Image (spheres, rainbow, N blue to C red):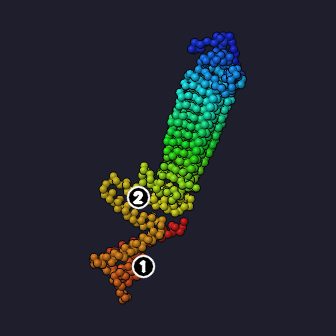
Amino acid sequence: MVSDYYSFKVNIVDKIFYTEEGNQFPKTAIISLFDINNKVITSKDFGYIDTIDIYNHIDKKEPLNLDYCYIKNFSITTYRRLHLLDKKDYVSIKNISAKYAFFDSNFSIDFSYIKITDGGMNFSNTHFAEGDLNFSNTHFGKDKTDFSYSVFRNNRADFSNTFFGNKGLNFKNAIFHQGIKDFQYADFGNGDAIFTNTEFSDGDVSFINTNFNDGNVSFKVARFGKGNIVFHFAKFGKGQISFERTEFGDGKIDFRTVEFNEGKANFNRANFGEGDISFEASSSSQGKITFKRTNFGEGSINFELVECENTDVIFEKATFGHNDVSFFNSKFNFLSLKSCHLDDYLDLRVKKCNKLNLADTIARDIIDLKPYNFKVDINRLNLTGMRLLGCIYIDWFDNDVKQIIYRQTNTSFKEKADQFRTLKESFNKTGEYNDEDRSYVEFKRCEAKSKLLETKEKGKLKKINRQIRYWIQWLTFDQAGYYATNPLRVLTAMVGVYIIFSLLFIVIFYFGNSDILSATNAPALNLFERSFYHSAITFLTIGYGDHYPIGWSRVLSPIEGFAGMFLMSYFTVALVRKILR
C-alpha cells in the first residue's frame, strides 16, 4: 500500500469482505488515500472489525486474526479499564496476526503490557496510520515477530521495555515517518534483529540500554533522518552486527558505553551526517569492528576511553572530513587507519595498542602520539607510504620510536627506512632536532641494509662487492659519526684512528723494514715518541718535515693522511650542521 500520502478517508459499507485465507467480515472498510491537492492516489478495501469484537476474542482466550482488517481505536489500556485491571497488569493473548491490516486511532494505538502465550505477532505489511503507537512492556512471544514492509505514520512509536523472544524480530523494509522511535530497554532475545533497509525518517531514535543478546543484528542500508540516534549503554552479544551502508543523517550519533562483546561490528561504507559522533567508553571483548570506506561527515569524532584490548578496529580508506578525531586513553589490539585522509587534528594518545597502522595515509594536520599524563603504550607502529603534510607529535624515548618501528614483522628494511624518513621530516617541522638526527641515522641504516639485501639474486660477485661496500659505509659513515649527526662521536673516532696508526708505526718497526728518521740535528726521540709525533703531524696534515718515514712506514703514512683529512672534514660537517640549527 502507498506510504506517502497527505490524508486518507474511511468509508464503512455493509458489504461482506473475504480475505485471501477465506475469512470473512460482515462489513467492508474502503480507504482512500489523497495527495496534498486532495486528489485520490489509490483506494483499497479492508475487512472491518469493531474493537469490542476484538476484546471479546481476548476474553475467550482466542488468537487474534486481524489480517486485511481496518481497526479503529484499538487500545489494550481501554480493555484493562473495562475489566477493572491495573494499568500495568499484563493481558494474555495467544497470538496476534495482523498482516496487511490498517490501524487508525484518534488517540493511541495501544498494544502495551500484552503477553503472547502461544506463537508470536505478525504485523507484516501493516499500516499504522493515525495516533501514537504504543508497544511498551509487551512480550512478543516465542515465535518470530514480523513488522516487515510495515508503515508507521505515528508521531511516536514506543517499543520501550519490550521483549521480543528468541525467534527474532523483522523490521525489514519498514517505513517510519517523522517522530520519535523508542526502543529503550528493549530485549531482543537470542534471535536476529533485522532492520535492513528500514526508513527511520526524521526524529530521535533511541536504543538506550537495549539488549540485543547473541543474535545477528542488521541495520544494513537503513536510513535515518534528522534527529539524534542513541545506542547509549546498548549491549550486543556473539552475533554479527551490521551497519553497512547505513545512512545516519545529520543528528548526534551516540554509541557511548556500548558493549559489542564478541560480535563483529560492520560499519563499512556507512555515511554519517553533520552531527557529532561518539563511541566514548564503548567496549569489545574479542570481536572486530570495521569502518572501511566509511564517511564520517562534518561532526567531531570521539573514540576516547574505548576498551578494545583484544579487538581489531579498522578504518581503512575512511573519510574523516575536517573533523577532530580522538582515540585518547583507549585500548586496542590493532588500530588501522590505512589509506585514510586525515585533514584535521588526530589524537592517537592511546593507552595501549599492540599494532597501530597509519600506512598510506595522507595527513594534513597534527597526529598526536606524545604522552601527556600517562604512558602511550604502542608495541608496533607502521607509517609506510604516509604522505605527511602536517606533523607527528611523538617522543623518541617516551614512545620508544626506534623499537615500535623495528618490531614490525611484515615490512622490509626499505619500508622501515621510509618510515624513519617520515619521522625525520616531522621532527624537523616540530623543532626536535636531536630526535630528527636519531631518525635520520635509522633511516640511513635501514636504507643501507635494504640495498645490501637487494643483491641476493644478482650473482655472487655483486653480492661480495655489495658486502664490502656496506661494511665500509657502516664503519666510515655510521660508526665514525652517526652519519654526521654527532660531532663528539667523530672527534672520538679521530682520536681512536690516530692512536691506532701511532701503534702501527711501532709494530711494523719490529716486523719489517720500517722506521721514522729525523731530518735535523734536534735531540733524538725514542721509537714511541717518533711514532706518535709522526702520526700526529701526518693525521693533522701539518707536515713539518723534521721527521720522515722509510720502508713500510711510507705506505702507512699517506693512508693515515687521507684518514685524517677525511675525519677532519667529517667533523667539520657534523659540527657546522649542529651549530647552524
Determine which of the numbered discs, if any, sits on residue 16 in the image.
none
Residue 185 vertical placement versus 328 (above, below)? above
- Quadrant including the N terminus: top right
Decide if residue 518 is on the left or right side of residue 10.
left
Kindly state the secondary structure of the residue where label 1 is placed: loop
- Quadrant including the C terminus: bottom right
Q: Residues within 10 Å of mark 2 (few under 14, many from 20)?
A: many
In the depicted view, which residue is nearer to us: 250 or 80? Answer: 80
Upstream in sequence: badge 2 or badge 1: 2
Q: Position of residue 147 (x, y in %)?
A: 59, 26
Determine which of the numbered discs, if any, sits on residue 448 in the image.
2
Image point (49%, 56%), residue name: 401
In the depicted view, which residue is nearer to us: 337 or 42? Answer: 337
Image point (70%, 22%), residue name: 84
Q: Indicate which label's residue lies in the foreground, 2 or 1.
A: 2
Q: Amino acid at mark 1?
A: Ile
Decide if residue 567 is on the left or right side of residue 49.
left
Q: Position of residue 111 (x, y in %)?
A: 65, 25
Image point (40%, 57%), residue name: 449
Q: Amino acid at mark 2?
A: Ala
Q: Residues within 10 Å of mark 1 (few under 14, many from 20)?
A: few
Decide if residue 447 is on the left or right side of residue 263.
left
Q: Which residue is mark 1?
A: 542
Q: Position of residue 202 (x, y in %)?
A: 66, 33
Q: Position of residue 406 (x, y in %)?
A: 44, 54
* Quarter of the image where one finds residue 375: bottom right
The furthest residue to the left:
512
How far apart are the two marked residues, 2 and 1, measured between alpha carbons?
35 Å
Tell me if residue 575 can be seen: yes
